[in-house]
Amino acid sequence: MKKHIILFVMFVYTCSLQAQVVRGLRIGYIDMEYILQNAPDYTEAKNQLEQKAQKWKQEISTKTAEIDKLKESLKTERVLLTKELIEEREEEITFQEKELMDFQEKRFGPNGDLMVQKAVLVKPIQDQVFTAVQDIAEQKRYDFVFDKSSDLTMIFAAKQFDISEQVIRKLSRTSKRSQLSKKELKEEAIKEYKEDVEDANSDFAIRKKMLDDKKAARDSLISVRKEARDKILADRKAAADAKRAEAAAKRQEAIDKKNGVTTPANKPAETPKEKPAAAPASENANKTAPDEKSDAETEKEAQRKLMLEAKKKEMDDRRKALADKKAKAIKDREDAKKAKEAGTTPPPK
């Protein structure tokens, strides 16, 4: 049995891999017991079979009562009967008990009339169910359809893939058609079409919901990843800023040490972007060497700017002189050309 199950699982897995290359795998299932309980033909035949079973049970009950009556009678009259009569009655009771057991086995045993007639009753309806399942599977393009009530163990089965109700409707339609007139058949065909449309819309809604759930899960995962990435970047930026601040503090400490200035241990390090505030006029006289060096650098920077501006002005003047010269040359050529065309001597330059 285990070997068959393993082979079946391998077959399903292989088929699923091949089917997924082209499109998504579609699997449905039915509950045969539920379908049989709701099938019109099966319900009527089952009622007739139950009536027979009740009749057989009544016969068994009557025979059991007769045997109990014989036992009670023997118990009461035992002291008045001879040994031969007692044995005769006990044999009669044993014979009737054996007949009762044989009757029970014949009617309700594993191969009894009840099981045989039930199998005869179920077989044509099962054939109808299998035909209906094949039609629905071909119409809805199912790759596999399982029977939930069979020996195949289904650990979990989502209700949205249960097509038992569709099979019951198909069986009911087939049963009704033989009893309807032409007008009723036309009305029934319209009703069946509406039900088929509803089923199609339901399948579309199920597929849409599955796609929406997948999209929501994907968006949620993307959002989580983005938040994690932003957090990592923020942590890296904070670490880089801390390193820059530490490096600036070390450079400032080295400068102060070189200039003989002692920096307090608890003094916060200044970032490279911070500019020193202007010192009050009363402290100008007490400026230290770093302040003088800063003023010298500022003056040097101002001189460099002035030199750049002067150089830029000189280049602008040169460009302007070249442009004027070029314009004058063009004008002279045009005047000479006009004079030549007029047959006159051009004016001296």
Image (spheres, rainbow, N blue to C red):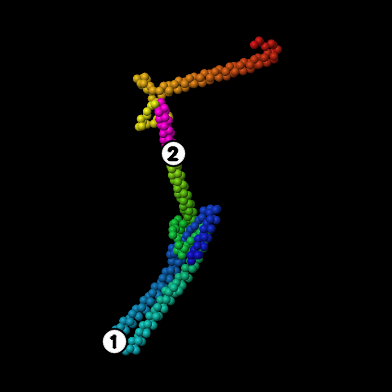
Closer-to-camera residue (246/289): 289
Q: Secondary structure beneath disc 2? A: helix
Position in image of residue 281 (x %, y %): 36, 19
Position in image of residue 115 (x %, y %): 44, 72
In this rendering, the count of numbered labels is 2
Q: Is residue 139 visible?
A: no
Q: Amino acid at mark 2?
A: Arg
Position in image of residue 103 (x %, y %): 41, 78
Q: Secondary structure beneath disc 1? A: helix
Question: Any magenta on residue 257?
Answer: yes
User: Which numbered mark, 1 or 2, is in the foreground of this view?
Assistant: 2
Question: Any magenta on residue 17?
Answer: no
The residue sitting at 41% across, 24% down in the picture is 290
Q: Quadrant of the C terminus?
A: top right
The residue sitting at 43% across, 71% down in the picture is 49
Closer-to-camera residue (42/190): 42
- Would you say the residues marked 1 and 2 are in contact, meaning their CB atoms lie under 8 Å apart? no
Residue 51 vs 260, above or below: the answer is below
Crowd tier of the residue under label 2, counting other residues whose Cα lies within 10 Å: few below 14, some 14–19, many 20 or above = few
Q: Specify the label residue 288 is tagged with.
A: none
Q: Which residue is mark 1?
A: 79
Closer-to-camera residue (137/297): 297
Closer-to-camera residue (46/4): 4
Q: Which residue is mark 2?
A: 236
Write down the quadrant of residue 56 in the picture: bottom left
For the residues labelled 1 and 2, the Cα–Cα distance comes to 109 Å
Residues in magenta?
Answer: 236-259
The residue sitting at 41% across, 32% down in the picture is 250
Compare marks 1 and 2 and give the one earlier in the sequence. 1
Position in image of residue 8 (x %, y %): 51, 62
